[in-house]
Amino acid sequence: MKILILLLVALLFGGGGFGAGWYLFANKDAHEEKVEAPPEPPPPAGPPVFVNIGPLTVPVLGAERIDQFVTLMVALEVPDAAMADRVRDQAPRLTDAFLTGVYGVIASGKAMQAGLLDVPQIKAKLNESTTKVMGKGIVRDVLIQVVNQRPM
């Protein structure tokens, strides 16, 4: 009797699993959710505003001493003057995030190729740091205006 009940329960669950699988996978196209792309933001009303940050000076450490100093001048592109004021208010936090991020990527060796700075790598790190401090949608782009490497 117990075996009959176990077989009946197994048949019930097996049939239910088969039916659910057939329903989900055979009608896959019917059940896929349509994901719409988010609408593009409206174009800015006026020209962008640039907020200068820096100069940022970061030491490049060698095995026993400082090998060189890297100095960067950075400008942040924002859509309008109101956003520029928000960015200026956060300038100390941005400077800290930039120095921490750039120093970390240089110290790891990822941003130096044969003694020269990999500018796209640095720019990506600056964009990442800006998004962490300001959030998305505030700063459009990070522009590196000047890169100066001074050997010691």
Image (tube, helix red, strand yellow):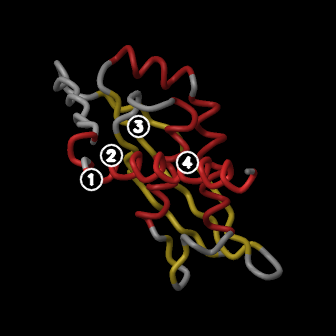
**Residue 32: image x %, image y %?**
27, 42
The amino acid sitting under disc 4 is Phe
Between the residue at mark 3 and the residue at mark 4, the CA separation in whole angstroms equals: 60 Å
Question: Mark number for residue 26?
Answer: 1
- Residue that mark 4 sits on: 13
Name the spot of residue 55 as percent of width and height, x first.
54, 46
**Quick one: label 3, few (<14), some, or many (20+) residues within 10 Å?**
many
> Mark 4 packing: few (<14 Cα in 10 Å), some, or many (20+)?
few
Residue 54 quadrant: top right
Between 85 and 19, the residue placed more toward the observer is: 19
**Pointer 2 residue:** 23
- N-term-proximal mark, 1 vs 4: 4
Whole-number angstrom distance, CA of label 3 to CA of label 1? 51 Å
Identify the residue under disc 3: 76
Quadrant containing the C terminus in the rendered view: bottom right
x%, y% of residue 27? 25, 47
Question: What's the amino acid at mark 2?
Answer: Tyr
